[in-house]
Image (spheres, rainbow, N blue to C red):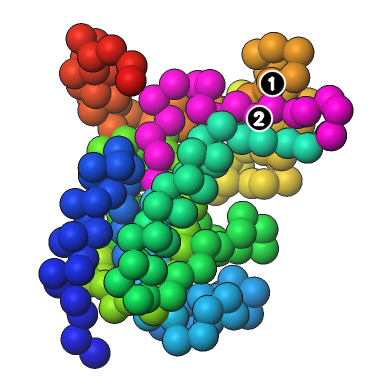
């Protein structure tokens, strides 16, 4: 199937203008390995592309969870911004007569895995996506669309991790027995070590994100580039 290079270029330009840090396009046919509820066609018939949007977690506050004591509802700072980005991309495509569907967080897609399928970066030893620009300091969201956008090349292996073990060495829970990530060890540790930033706002352990050296230089560059800009 021929892919629309021009539309892809325009969409990438639009995303840049909106300040979206990471953009990738994955082939829905590669999702057959996942359960039914994690496949694009379950959400949108005639889905042709899965769009992944990512936000650089350049400040820890973006990765914080807030619990509203009145409603009991949770809200994640970066995720709320990502949902806004998804809506902007959806509007961009709908203006051009393409259908789109923003995918819920749960059941949703396996965001790290599909980002690797979109060629954004590999999954590292820390069991997280490693993007070239921001390392694992990214939060992700996805939407699927009938637009035939140009696809990224899947990445199946992390060249970054070949001679590195920093995330494993720094993990306070020792959640990498024999070098492999263990959710069974990580999760109880995270739940019992939630860090409160304020009365209703907390962050989870992020040592394996922070200890990954990939993307750090970019982080400082970005902060440095912004230092003379005033918020608008
Ligand atoms: S989140 Fe914390 S406990 Fe879990 S693997 Fe990463 S560093 Fe270890
Ligand atoms: S810290 Fe090193 S081993 Fe761990 S994910 Fe990053 S590059 Fe890979």
Q: Residues within 10 Å of mark 2 (few under 14, many from 20)?
A: many
Q: What percent of the width, then of the height, locates residue 147? A: 33, 76
Q: Residues within 10 Å of mark 1 (few under 14, many from 20)?
A: some
Q: Quadrant of residue 89?
A: bottom left
Q: Answer yes or no: is residue 113 visible.
A: no
Q: Find residue 65 and name its label.
A: 2
Residue drawn at (54%, 41%) of the image: 79
Label 2's element?
Answer: strand
C-alpha distance separating marks 2 and 1: 6 Å
Q: What percent of the width, then of the height, locates residue 38? A: 59, 71
The N terminus, quarter of image: bottom left
Q: Is residue 220 magenta?
A: no
Residue drawn at (53%, 21%) of the image: 61
Label 1's element?
Answer: strand
Q: Answer yes or no: is residue 16 visible.
A: yes
Residue drawn at (45%, 53%) of the image: 86
Please report the bounds of the magenta region as a residue range.
54-71
Q: Quadrant of residue 204?
A: top right
User: Is the CB of mark 1 within 8 Å of ligand 1?
Assistant: no
Q: Which residue is mark 1?
A: 201
Closer to the chain start, of discs 2 and 1, is: 2
Front in this rendered view, residue 77 or 140: 77
- Marks counted in the figure total 2
Does 87 appear above or below 46? above
- Asked whether the residues under the numbered discs 2 and 1 touch, taking CB atoms below 8 Å apart as contact, a structural biologist would say yes
């Amino acid at each position: 199937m021929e892919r629309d290079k021009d539309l892809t270029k325009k969409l990438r330009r639009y995303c840049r203008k909106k300040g979206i840090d990471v953009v990738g396009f994955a082939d829905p046919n590669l999702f057959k390995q996942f359960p039914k509820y994690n496949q694009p066609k379950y959400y949108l018939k005639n889905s042709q592309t899965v769009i992944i949007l990512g936000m650089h977690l350049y400040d820890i506050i973006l990765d914080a969870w807030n619990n509203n004591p009145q409603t009991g509802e949770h809200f994640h700072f970066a995720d709320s911004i990502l949902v806004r980005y998804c809506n902007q991309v959806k509007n961009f495509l709908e203006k051009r007569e393409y259908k789109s569907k923003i995918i819920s967080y749960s059941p949703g897609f396996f965001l790290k895995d599909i980002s690797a399928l979109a060629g954004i970066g590999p999954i590292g030893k820390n069991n997280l996506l490693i993007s070239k620009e921001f390392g694992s300091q990214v939060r992700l969201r996805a939407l699927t669309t009938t637009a035939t956008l140009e696809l990224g090349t899947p990445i199946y292996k992390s060249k970054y991790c070949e001679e590195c073990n920093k995330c494993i060495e720094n993990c306070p829970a020792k959640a990498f027995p024999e070098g492999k990530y263990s959710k069974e060890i990580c999760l109880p540790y995270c739940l019992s070590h939630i860090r409160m930033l304020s009365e209703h706002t907390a962050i989870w352990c992020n040592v394996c994100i922070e200890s990954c050296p990939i993307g750090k230089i970019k982080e400082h560059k970005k902060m440095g580039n912004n230092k003379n800009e005033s918020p608008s």
